[in-house]
Image: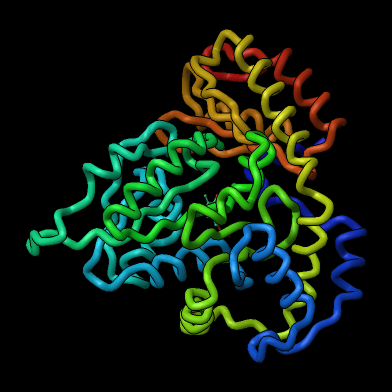
């Protein structure tokens, strides 16, 4: 049995999702004439209580567009040092927006209001870049799927208001936080100026992200999306998968969370596992005694696939296509695994 725990992006559309895609009504979305895309955008905007939303081919493009909307070249944004926008979007913050990042040393990818306050450059001190944006991530990817305390998110919002800073949420993994913390999209829509959400991570659609914000911001966003090459034509075929995913695959995220916790509990029992990070959602990060590259290779030989994250950290991500059958098999395999002299037997 092949078990792929590299990421929750490895899922494939189910027959029901494919059916929704094949029967979608489509039109030219560059002319805003694709009824399925329009429906998806309207639905997501409404979920978050915002005026408008815009469909994007990727989460990176949605985030990069938001950053461009909130900033001018030479300015600076504030984010955690683990932030996806800084680490995994190809340097797009500087390439696309000419903006620098003030990176904060947060806790599992999460920063606090007082950290943000201290990181704002004085606006009258023209030697340093002007701070104009704060970007949070929830759940945090590199932080191991950790979820913010919503009270802290509100405190950071206050700091943003006091200092007239834009407030963006990289919510590629927000669905997981909503389910884990029993929060609502409306709460988030009230606080943030812009939010990006992903349809192809936990929700199982093949492609797609949505950026949410005010009407005037989304009018500007469509221009930036065009510049970045993200204007798409009969893309309702893909938006249909996103609509299906939102309607059918949200609540089941808790199954992924449960499986992740069970994997974590099993790892805790293994003598060669040094540390397992707290598991809030569907990401399990742990460290082992010995060479992790060798561990990955030995597990691959057993048809178990996952990634190292550097600094000795290893990561499993549970998802829709990681079935209960796979889970039972994997737990048993973990239970019986032995790590002797840097080899798994
Ligand atoms: C996956 C992810 C993104 C976007 O990734 P794409 O591959 O560009 O869709 C953005 N932020 C976070 C936190 C993510 O996990």
Compared to residue 138, the image places residue 123 above or below, namely below
Total labels: the figure holds 0
Q: Where is residue 247 in the image (x, y as percent from the top left)?
A: 82, 56
108 sits left or right of 139 in the view: left
Q: Quadrant of residue 22?
A: bottom right
Q: Position of residue 13 (x, y in %)?
A: 82, 58
Q: Where is residue 110 in the image (x, y as percent from the top left)?
A: 42, 38
Query: Looking at the image, which residue is at 51% across and 68% down?
Result: 61
Coloring applied to the structure? rainbow
Q: Position of residue 93 (x, y in %)?
A: 36, 64
Query: Looking at the image, which residue is at 29% across and 37% down?
Result: 114
Q: Ligand 1 appears in which quadrant? A: bottom right
Query: Looking at the image, which residue is at 17% across and 61% down?
Result: 129
258 sits left or right of 340 in the view: right
234 sits left or right of 68 in the view: right
Compared to residue 166, the image places residue 111 above or below, namely above
Location of the C terminus by quadrant is: top right
Compared to residue 49, the image places residue 11 above or below, namely above
Query: Looking at the image, which residue is at 47% across and 36% down?
Result: 151
Compared to residue 84, the image places residue 146 above or below, namely above
**Residue 297 visible:** no
**Residue 34 visible:** yes
Foreground of the two, 124 or 254: 124
Location of the N terminus by quadrant is: top right
315 sits left or right of 235 in the view: left
């Amino acid at each position: 049995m092949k078990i792929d725990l590299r990421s929750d992006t490895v899922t494939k559309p189910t027959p029901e999702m494919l059916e929704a895609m094949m029967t979608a009504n489509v039109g030219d979305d560059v002319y805003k004439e694709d009824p399925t895309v329009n429906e998806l955008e309207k639905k997501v905007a409404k979920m978050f209580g915002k005026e408008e939303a815009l469909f994007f081919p990727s989460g990176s493009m949605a985030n990069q567009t938001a950053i461009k909307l909130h900033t001018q070249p030479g300015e600076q944004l504030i984010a955690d040092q683990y932030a996806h926008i800084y680490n995994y979007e190809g340097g797009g913050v500087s390439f696309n927006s000419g903006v620098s990042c003030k990176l904060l040393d947060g806790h599992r990818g999460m920063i606090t209001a007082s950290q943000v306050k201290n990181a704002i450059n004085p606006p009258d001190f023209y030697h340093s870049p002007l701070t104009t944006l704060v970007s949070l991530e929830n759940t945090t990817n590199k932080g191991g799927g950790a979820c913010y305390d919503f009270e802290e998110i509100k405190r950071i919002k206050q700091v943003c208001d006091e200092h007239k800073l834009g407030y963006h949420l990289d919510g590629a993994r927000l669905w997981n936080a909503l389910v884990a913390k029993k929060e609502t999209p409306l709460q988030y829509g009230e606080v943030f100026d812009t939010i990006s959400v992903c349809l192809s991570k936990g929700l199982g659609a093949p492609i797609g992200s949505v950026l949410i914000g005010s009407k005037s911001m989304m009018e500007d966003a469509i221009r930036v999306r065009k510049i970045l090459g993200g204007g798409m034509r009969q893309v309702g075929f893909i938006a249909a998968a996103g609509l299906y995913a939102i309607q059918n695959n949200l609540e089941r995220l808790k199954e992924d969370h449960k499986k992740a916790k069970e994997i974590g509990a099993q790892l805790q029992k293994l003598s060669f596992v040094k540390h397992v990070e707290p598991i809030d959602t569907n990401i399990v990060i742990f460290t082992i005694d010995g060479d992790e590259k060798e561990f990955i290779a030995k597990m691959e030989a057993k048809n178990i696939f996952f990634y190292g994250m550097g600094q000795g950290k290893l990561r499993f991500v549970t998802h829709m296509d990681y079935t209960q059958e796979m889970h039972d098999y994997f737990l048993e395999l973990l239970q019986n695994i032995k790590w002797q002299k840097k080899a798994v037997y």
